């Protein structure tokens, strides 16, 4: 028999949360893999139907979860989608603008000619790493440490990381992570500015 409940304590980054049954029984563990993939992402306060099983850890787990009544209207969802698209375009603009400025410096003979290539390669690596970590979070696989993600950004992969965060909707809501991430962006830009200034002085 299918149960009805409300999704609570939803962690979209890690892809799981809990369902509180409408009948007031014990809450049930819910994983993103049990939601219909062709529809939108689950959101806290969604009303759902599901069946229950007890897993090998002795906890109640929801299976075959279906949305019953969306907790948010289509109007709100459309605004959320628009905001998400705007965020992607803004981050893409920041990343492309930075790489374009770096290309101008390279063509002007300021700095190492391989500098732009290094940034592009590290950005591609960072983008792929974020994608892999998002998949691991959704499927319960091996996660990439936050320190590794920050190291990639600090080393020069932050343009790719910036785009990946919006494309994969990954790490964007985790404020402590975002604070450190933007610190690595600033730190990398400062180091780059010092390097370019030294190179310009050497060629001057």
Image: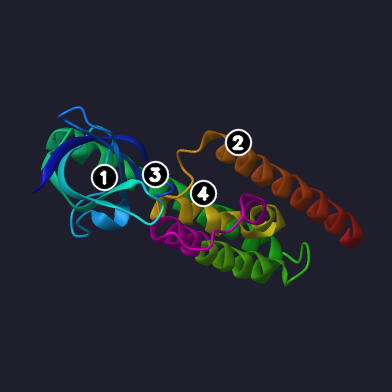
Label 4 or label 3, whichever lies nearer to me, is: 3
Residue carrying label 4: 94
Is 188 positioned to the left or the right of 172 in the image? Answer: right
Of all residues, the one furthest to the top in this rendering is 24
Quick one: label 1, few (<14), some, or many (20+) residues within 10 Å? many
- Look at the image and say whether residue 134 sits in the magenta stretch: yes
Q: Which residue is mark 1?
A: 42
Kind of element beneath mark 1: loop
Q: Position of residue 64 (x, y in %)?
A: 18, 55
Residue at image point 42% right, 50% down: 166
Q: Which of pointers 4 and 3 lies earlier in the amino acid sequence?
A: 3
Magenta stretch, main secondary structure class: helix
Q: Which residues are magenta?
A: 130-150
Q: Is residue 64 left or right of residue 193?
A: left
**Contact (Cβ within 8 Å) of mark 1 with mark 3:** no
Sequence-wise, which precedes: disc 4 or disc 1? Answer: 1
Q: Position of residue 14 (x, y in %)?
A: 43, 48
Sequence-earlier tag: 2 or 4? 4
From the image, state whether disc 1 or disc 2 is nearer to you.
1
Disc 3: which residue: 87
For the C terminus, the quadrant is bottom right
* Element on which disc 4 rests: helix
What is the spatial separation of the Cα atoms under label 1 and label 2, in whole angstroms? 26 Å
Report the front residue among 67 and 197: 67
- Of the numbered discs 1 and 2, the one sitting upstream in the chain is 1
The percent coordinates of residue 182 (x first, y second) are 61, 41
Q: Mark 2 highlights which residue?
A: 179
Q: CA distance from mark 1 to mark 3?
A: 20 Å
């Amino acid at each position: 028999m299918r149960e009805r409940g409300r999704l609570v304590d939803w962690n979209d980054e890690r892809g799981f949360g809990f369902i509180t049954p409408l009948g007031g029984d014990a809450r049930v563990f819910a994983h993103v893999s049990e939601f219909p993939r062709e529809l939108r992402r689950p959101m806290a306060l969604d009303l759902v139907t599901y069946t229950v099983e007890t897993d090998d850890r002795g906890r109640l787990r929801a299976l075959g979860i279906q949305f019953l009544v969306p907790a948010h209207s289509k109007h709100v969802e459309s605004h959320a989608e628009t905001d998400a698209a705007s965020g992607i375009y803004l981050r893409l603009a920041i990343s492309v603008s930075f790489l374009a400025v770096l290309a101008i410096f390279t063509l002007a003979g300021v700095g190492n000619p391989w500098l732009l290539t290094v940034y592009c390669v590290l950005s591609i690596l960072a983008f792929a790493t974020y994608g892999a970590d998002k998949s691991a979070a959704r499927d319960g696989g091996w996660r990439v440490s936050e320190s590794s993600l920050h190291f990639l950004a600090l080393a020069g992969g932050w343009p790719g990381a910036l785009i990946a965060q919006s494309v994969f909707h990954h790490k964007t809501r985790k404020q402590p992570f975002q604070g450190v991430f933007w610190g690595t962006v600033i730190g990398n830009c400062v180091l780059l500015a010092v390097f370019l200034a030294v190179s310009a002085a050497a060629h001057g």
